Amino acid sequence: MSDSLKIENGKYEIVIEEDYSVNIYRGGEVWISKPLGEKMFIALVHEPQSNEAMSKQKDRIIKDLQERLNGFLKEEESNKYTTEE
């Protein structure tokens, strides 16, 4: 499976092939094959995926903390009424 990144509203697509070679497509056709600095292109393509994964993980952690806090607050509220009687 190859990874890719489209830029300029899809005009260009940087594709990391299964063998980690890099091709840059323009208009759906290979424009540049094996450009200089291939490792930089690989990092560029993988960075948004890494950022997206971190963002999803952050969202899951925040949701979990909110649920725990809500549970704690409900428990505190419940305890408040039982100790006042």
Image (cartoon, grey):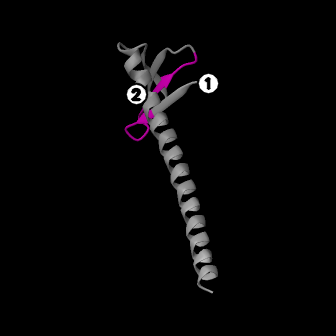
Q: Position of residue 54 (x, y in %)?
A: 48, 40
Residue 13, located in which quarter of the rendered image?
top left
For this view, does 54 lie left or right of residue 64?
left
Q: What's the residue at 53%, 50% (across, down)?
A: 61
For this view, does 36 lie left or right of residue 77?
left
Q: Taking 11 as reference, is 41 above or below it? A: above
For this view, does 1 lie left or right of residue 12?
right
In front of the other: 32 or 2: 2
In front of the other: 41 or 14: 41
Residue 79 part of the magenta segment: no
Q: Position of residue 39 (x, y in %)?
A: 41, 16
- Marks 1/2 in contact by CB < 8 Å: the verdict is no
Q: What's the residue at 40%, 27% (across, down)?
A: 44
| Quadrant of the drawing holding the N terminus | top right
Q: Position of residue 74 (x, y in %)?
A: 59, 72
Label 1 sits on what residue type?
Met
Q: What's the residue at 46%, 32% (across, down)?
A: 5
Label 2 sits on what residue type?
Leu
| Quadrant of the drawing holding the C terminus | bottom right
Q: Taking 75 as reference, is 53 above or below it? A: above
Query: Disc 2 marks which residue?
Result: 44
Where does the magenta region start and end?
6-18
Residue 16 part of the magenta segment: yes
The answer to whether residue 13 of the structure is visible from this angle is no
- In the picture, the disc for residue 1 is 1
Residue 68, located in which quarter of the rendered image?
bottom right
Q: Position of residue 56 (x, y in %)?
A: 52, 46
Mark 2 burial class by Cα count in 10 Å: few <14, some 14-19, many 20+: some
The earlier-in-sequence mark between 1 and 2 is 1
Q: Taking 28 as reference, is 39 above or below it? A: above
